[in-house]
Each structure stands twice: as structure tokens, then as C-alpha cells.
Image: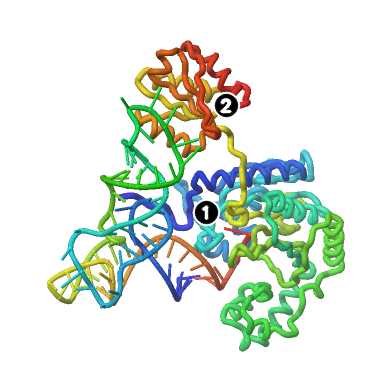
Amino acid sequence: MPIPGIRGFKDILPEEAKRWQHIEKVARDVFRCFGFKEIRIPILEKTELFARSIGETTDIVEKEMYTFVDRSGESLTLRPEATASILRAFIEHGLYAQDKIQKLYTIGPMFRHERPQKGRYRQFHQINAEAIGLDSPTIDAELMTMAMHILSALGISGVELQINSLGCSHCRPQFRQDLQSFLGTRQAGLCPDCQRRTVSNPLRVLDCKVERCRAALEGMPSLSEYLCPDCKTHLHAVERQIQLFGVPYIINPLMVRGLDYYTRTTFEITSLALGAQSAVAAGGRYDGLIKELGGPELSGMGFAIGMERLSLLIGDLQKIEEEPILFVAAMGEKACVIAARIAHRLRLAGIQAEIDYEGHSLKSQMRRAGKIGASLVLIVGDDELARNSITMRDMKSSRQWAVDFNNDIEALVLCIGEEMGRFV
RNA sequence: GUGGGCGUGGCUCAGGUGGUUAGAGCACUGGGUUGUGGCCCCAGAGGUCGAGGGUUCGAGUCCCUCCGCUCACCCCA
């Protein structure tokens, strides 16, 4: 009996993996231009790290983490996001001692035990960027710009950048309290979810999609009116800067985030092409978090891009240039041996070379050569060997000719290299 | 955790009101061309019809249970 894979854990098959490689390559190149360095971090951390950073009462921590006790009795968790781990590493290795400013990125799998649906899996992959040690609103704008640039560099259009400010530790508590008491007076008109949210996470009511909730919330306190002068100034500066970068955006005062650590600037990049899970990227500022995790008093700002969602948006439009392929077809025992040697030598020269392994007919080998997209086929057989030559066939033009071959593979390989326009 | 839709060869799907050996296209293998790909033609191989139980002389088809996939809610990248 075959053993199936786990729900929500998807295989990325070769055809799609090719697209993923392309995505990563483009992203890495953008990071390089923006001065971000790669950091590679473990996928397991102590559970405590996520509980403290993401928030004890968030859905992620309460019911979505893959948490288990390992053989030494310690509670570990498969990371549900990357920020906490990056900050942990940043603190643990004292990176701030070399340079207070650290621009870091990582690409890899994250794990959340949610019900899978379009664009959402239990093991999913994120491209994650963090800019640590900067209070300047310019870095906020720069990060959002960079995220947008990665998307456009991948040929993705039709996305919307939404920005909001969640306030800081000075102004948000008052808003939360006032919102909560306001919601208390409107319970009857709210959907069951929002009635629950009133207690657990009142800010979430802001972006409820249920129509009748919208109506019941007439006259509700507005977050933007509660922002303290510093937060207001910061938001305006972010706006000014992102306008200077020429990136279109909209301010969405109703957008909130699901992780507790966000302060001030938050953003989301959405696309209607994604279905219900419309966010392809999201992030924000987290000013108190590094200290909260036992590090220095430095602020930070970061974002994550969902790889699966990116892949959905790119679709099949992506024409990735293929390297040329050579197929060595062989007829007869001697020829098979020589074919394998030729292929081997070509491979060492950096050319993709394929052979037949099962003694198929020449017709069948030719069919296979065509199928895998070989541009050049070498035909080695009794006839050729008897005449000290091999046959070369250009698959595109169907032109074919004989090439001298006195059992001298090096000379042959030179000839092939010329034919394929490559250095061997 | 909740709800809708769907499970038939590797893939995409046909299979009125239950009836004999479950079909097609694509892909695969061989042949038509005793050594030549794509197009065409012929042949072949490949399926416990998601699983288990029930009704029936008889179940891919009807009933029940379970499992899986998928979309949506919740939540989020």
C-alpha cells in the first residue's frame, strides 16, 4: 500500500520547481540591489519564541502551530513565520555590534495547521525581508517599494498596495479600549464572529467583510483619529516618501494585522486573481519587538511574500529560456558504450546530454529525443563505426550529416561544441 | 473547527431511470519505414470505478459510514 503525503503539504513537481527557481533568482537579485543579505535560519525554534513575539492569544499561537515535545522534554515549534527566528539570530549573535543597521532576507518553508484552500497550505513558503535598526519612515517606504518591485520584476501586475498605521504603544491602547466599549453597544447588529472578536481581538472587527456588520458599525471610532502626533508624522512621511518612489498605493484605515507585534506602518499587497486569500505580501513595523525578545532597543520593519501565491500570479506566462539539450542515440552494444562516453564527456563540459538506457529502437530513441526537446542528436551505430564516423542531426532543420570519428572523443566534442555554439 | 462541490487507467474526463467482457482523448510501448523525432494510421500495455458496509438475482450507478481532494468561512503570506 502506498503511503500518501500529508494534508496541506504539497510536492513541488519539476515543472513548477522551475518556476520557483526563477522566482527565487529574481528576488535574490532585487535584494542584492537593495542591500539585503541572506540569512539562513533553522525551521525549529523553542515554542516560547513564537509565543512571545507573535502573541499568546493570536490564532497562530493558540491553534495553528506545529508544536511538540522533543526527546529531551523541550517544547519546540515548526516556525509559523520567519521574523521571530531572524530577530532571535540577530540578538543571539550580536549582529548589532558590528552594524546597528541590518538588512536581512531569508527564503524558506513555514508551517501552520490551518485548513488548506486556494493559496494556503500547511507547509508554505515565504520570501522574508527584515530591516533592523532604523526608525526612519524612509525604510518603511523602501521596503514596500522593494516588495512591489519584486512583483513587477516577475511580470506581475494588477496588484494593490494598501497601507495603514496601527499606532504605537502610546496611542493604540486607548483606541482599542474605546473601540471595545463602542462594540459593546452594538452587539445585536454584529455577526457572531464579530461578537466573539469584540472580546478576543476587537481590531479584527474593522476588516470584517459581512455586510450587516458594516452597517452596524456606523459611527465607530476611527483608528486614524487616535494616532498620536508622532505616529501621524511618521505615516505622513512614509506616504511622502513612497510617492517620491512613484509607487501607487492606497491608505486603508480598516486594514489590521494578525500578529500582535506590529506597530505603526503596516501594509498588504493584494490581488483579485488569488481568490479569497488575496494577500500576496504583507508586513509592517515592529518597534518594541527586539527588546521584548531580550535584545537591544532597536526598531525594525519587515515583510513576507507568499511563494505559492506568487506562483499562482505568474501562471504559465513565464517563458524561461531553456539550455540546449543533446541526445546520443545508439544502435548496438559497442555504440552504446561509446554513446555513454560521449554523453559523459559532454556533461563534464556543461552540456545536458541524454542517452537511451534500455536498448530501444532508433525510432523510439528519436521520438524521445524530440520529446525532451533535444536540439542536436548524435547517431552512433554499426554503420557509422564501420566508416569511422558518426551522424549528427539538427532537430530543428532535420538536416543531418556525417562527422569523422576515429574513436577520438575529444575531437568529436570540439566539433559538437562548435555546432551548439558553446565552449567545451 | 464549520459548510458547499468532487473522488472512474499516469493525466483530463464519458459512463439516461442499477443489467452481461467499464470506455475515449492525451501520455506510454511496439509496428507501418529490416537505422531516423514532430503529423498520420494500426496494435499493445495499463483500472480492486477512494475505502468499508448495506439493499438487490445483479451496484461505477441506490443507501449509510469513513477517508481524501477542492473551494469558502475562520485566520492569514
Q: Is residue A289 among what the camera can see?
A: yes
Quarter of image, res A188: bottom right
Q: Nearer the viewer, residue A44 or A395?
A: A395
Residue drawn at point x = 69 percent, y = 79 percent: A180
Is residue A290 something one can see in this rendering? no
Residue A117 location in percent, x, y?
52, 63
Q: Quadrant of the C terminus of chain A?
A: top right
Front position among marks 2 and 1: 2
| First in residue order: circle 2 vs circle 1 | 1
* Within-10-Å neighbours for mark 1: few <14, some 14–19, many 20+: many
On the image, the x and y values in percent for residue B47 come to: 28, 53
A228 w.r.t. A360: above or below:
below
Q: Position of residue B54 (x, y in %)?
A: 19, 73
Does dot 2 land on a helix, a strand or a loop?
loop
Q: Which residue is mark 1?
A: A123
Letter of the chain that mark 2 sits on in the rendering: A
Q: Residue A350: which disc?
A: 2
